[in-house]
Image (tube, helix red, strand yellow):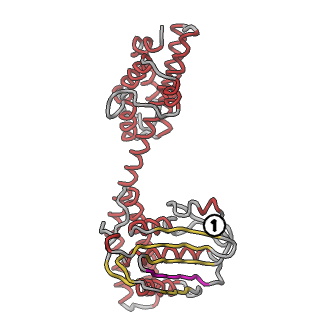
């Protein structure tokens, strides 16, 4: 008996084994009944059987084995995709999802071989069956991963929103305590609260910006007419106050006036300078150069220090990345590893470009921003 015919004939026996295995996938399956455990297994098997009965070229078989085949059913959503979506919502993890397909593959082939003793010409069905299961698994994993990503982004969005009110209450209370002049101990405690609240606010802002980019919304910008010499001067004054032991120099040449989001560009510059302070040579200055021409303004932040490896340089603007400190150690940090990523997203929101280069003498980050008004739109 051909494998497709066996699947159709013994569907209930195969589904019973699927259900028995799914029931072991705890804790998600702990309170699921038979219908939930079986989910779309029957539809997946019908699609596999239909695929086995359909003629197929060797090239199509190869593509399917790589997870790039056409959908098994003529529909906008396959049974495997729907199954993955429901499993994700039920709390299964991706290993459990893959294990279901592994168990299905093994049980179908074992039952078929034991029951039908297939002959050599029919063994081609095994190859076709494995390719069909691989295709279904690829569809499931893709949808499952997308659903998890959406859930994570929504959670981050809600977390960022809900944390703002209590954080604001802490900051206001700390400022009130500082203004009381109630003694050195109270003032010191209030100062620590204010500083910690500021760090929490920065982390929260980074988290919200990161979440917007992952949702495809991009960094929010409000362009107005600004002079980068002024807004960068203010930003660097604050950074010098925070890091009095470091020398930070600003050099401006050409026209630095344009239509950009001044606060966002301060954030971009701050992230680049803080990165230079953390990873650059401590006894050398951080140089900030702003150069304006007719169409663009170029911002460059450079520092002395050890060269960045080319493999690391290629991923400098990836999110959640941290480099080694001046001693070459990857230590725990109070930041999320989002500074350079957010800087790149701010540049992108202004239709600009950002790049990094590094050699034995210097590491430099360069941002090129178009000056024309129409290049930046409010988001």
Residue located at (52% from left, 82% from top): 289
Q: Nearer the viewer, residue 87 or 263?
A: 263
Helix, strand or loop for the magenta stretch, by majority: strand
Q: Which residue is mark 1?
A: 324
Q: In this picture, which residue range is highlighted in magenta?
A: 285-293
Q: Nearer the viewer, residue 211 or 285?
A: 285
Place residue 171 in its image quadrant. bottom left
Residue located at (44% from left, 18% from top): 55
Instruction: Tell me if mark 1 has few (under 14), some (14-19) or many (20+) residues whose alpha carbon lies within 10 angstroms of its own.
Output: few
Along the horizontal axis of the image, is 313 left or right of 168?
right
* Residue farthest along the front direction in this orientation: 294
Residue 140: x and y in percent read 43, 35
In the depicted structure, whether residue 337 falls above or below residue 90: below
Q: Residue 126 in magenta?
A: no
Q: Nearer the viewer, residue 135 or 333?
A: 135
Residue located at (52% from left, 69% from top): 334
Residue located at (40% from left, 67% from top): 351
Along the horizontal axis of the image, is 278 left or right of 79?
right
Q: Quadrant of the C terminus?
A: bottom left
Q: Residue 292 in magenta?
A: yes
Residue 222: x and y in percent read 31, 73
Residue 182: x and y in percent read 39, 90
In the depicted structure, whether residue 350 falls above or below residue 139: below
């Amino acid at each position: 008996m051909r494998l497709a015919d066996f699947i159709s004939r013994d569907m209930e026996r195969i589904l019973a084994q699927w259900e028995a295995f799914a029931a072991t996938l705890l804790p998600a399956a702990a309170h699921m009944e038979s219908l939930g455990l079986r989910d779309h297994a029957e539809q997946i098997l019908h699609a596999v059987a239909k695929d086995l009965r359909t003629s197929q070229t060797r090239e199509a078989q190869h593509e399917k084995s790589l997870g790039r085949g056409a959908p098994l059913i003529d529909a906008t959503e396959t049974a495997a995709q729907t199954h993955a979506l429901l499993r994700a919502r039920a709390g299964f993890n991706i290993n459990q999802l893959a294990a279901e397909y592994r168990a299905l593959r093994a049980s179908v082939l074992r039952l078929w071989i034991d029951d039908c003793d297939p002959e050599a010409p029919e063994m081609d069905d095994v190859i076709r069956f494995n390719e069909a299961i691989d295709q279904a698994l690829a569809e499931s994993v893709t949808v499952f991963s997308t659903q998890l990503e959406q859930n994570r982004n929504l959670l981050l969005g809600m977390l960022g929103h809900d944390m703002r009110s209590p954080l604001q209450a802490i900051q206001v209370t700390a400022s009130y305590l500082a203004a009381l002049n109630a003694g050195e101990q109270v003032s010191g405690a209030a100062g620590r609260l204010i500083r910690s609240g500021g760090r929490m606010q920065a982390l929260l802002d980074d988290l919200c910006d990161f979440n917007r980019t992952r949702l495809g919304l991009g960094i929010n910008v409000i362009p107005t007419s600004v002079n980068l010499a002024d807004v960068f001067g203010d930003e660097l004054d604050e950074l010098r106050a925070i890091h009095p032991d470091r020398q930070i120099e600003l050099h401006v040449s050409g026209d630095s006036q344009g239509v950009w989001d001044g606060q966002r560009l301060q954030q971009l510059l701050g992230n680049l300078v803080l990165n230079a302070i953390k990873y650059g040579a401590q006894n050398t200055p951080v140089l900030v150069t702003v150069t304006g021409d007719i169409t663009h303004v170029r911002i460059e932040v450079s520092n002395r220090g050890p060269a960045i490896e080319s493999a690391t340089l290629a991923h400098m603007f990836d999110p959640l990345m941290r480099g080694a400190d001046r001693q070459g150690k990857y230590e725990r940090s109070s930041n999320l590893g989002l500074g350079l990523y957010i800087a790149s997203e701010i540049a992108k929101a202004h239709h600009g470009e950002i790049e990094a280069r590094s050699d034995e003498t210097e590491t430099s980050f360069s941002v090129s921003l178009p000056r024309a008004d129409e290049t930046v739109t409010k988001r």
